[in-house]
Image: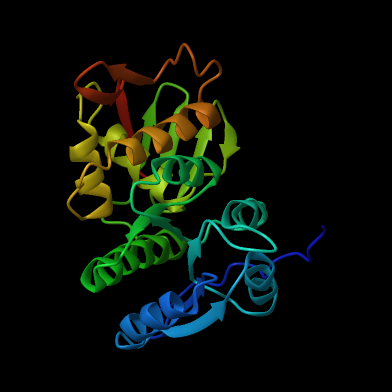
Amino acid sequence: MVFKQLLPIIELRGDEMAKILICDDERDIVNALKIYLSQEDYIIYEAFNGVEALEILVQEHIDLVLLDVMMPVMDGLEAMMHIRKTTTIPIILLTAKGEDTDKILGLNVGADDYITKPFNPMEVIARVKSQLRRYTQFNQGYVETSHILKVGGLELNDETKSVSMDGKQVRCTPTEFDILKFLMEHPNRVFSPKHIYEHVWKDHSYGAEGTVAVHIRHLREKLEINPSEPRYFKVVWGQGYKIEGELKHESE
């Protein structure tokens, strides 16, 4: 099945209401999420399978997607693979309690985070706000200190939000960028998955070690010549992760 190119990314300004697409085949869940998020003044779009979600993404500039896994016609994982071919907008996976396989598969395919059913309304709102904040800062070039971080051939430009390895540009999602930046700012220091999650997601980890592990693996696959023998992304078993090397700062 072939789909049209999704609309190009449009930067979300601070004075604009974010557009959120909720995709789940259970209408009660869609309605409940719509109630929660409408109270935060978000503009809500609804879809009940993956095909409908992709059609909306072609027509509208969506800022975030809440995506169920198990749906008719086209499931969430297949829809997400289509989405990730053209855009890095935040995707939060909706998973059933205890379905750890769905969570890991979803993160592998390209989800930024997940929420487990049944939902806690405050958790839904907090996770949506966190993802939108990160994505907005990423696209608007938000930067606290204008400089370039370099560790060996790995370079991160915090103003242009770009990453390169040995001079070659590498496309990273906002979540991957934030994890990479955090580790590069503290080279050779080991951080636990819990610490990384709470710093990047600005939320309690609640056993989210697997989420961090998947994103780290994605970064390795994108940036390391041999991911199984990494030069930069090191695992300290039982403790956490670190970027190994000497950090250099460069002002633009």
Residue 197 appears in the rendering: yes
Q: Position of residue 119 (x, y in %)?
A: 29, 67
Q: Quadrant of residue 177?
A: top left
Is the residue 36 above or below the residue 185 in the image?
below
Is the residue 153 above or below the residue 168 in the image?
above
Q: Position of residue 104 (x, y in %)?
A: 44, 40
| Residue pictured at 59% horizontal, 74% vertical | 48
Way the structure is coloured: rainbow
Q: Quadrant of residue 100?
A: top left
Q: Position of residue 252 (x, y in %)?
A: 40, 47
Q: How many marks?
A: 0
Is the residue 101 above or below the residue 31 in the image?
above
Q: Position of residue 227 (x, y in %)?
A: 50, 19
Residue 250 appears in the rendering: no
Quarter of the image that includes the N terminus = bottom right
Q: Quadrant of residue 192?
A: top left
| Residue pictured at 32% horizontal, 29% vertical | 248
Answer left or right for 201 relative to 71: left
| Residue pictured at 38% horizontal, 67% vertical | 132
Q: Residue furthest top?
A: 229
Front position in the image: 145 or 97: 97
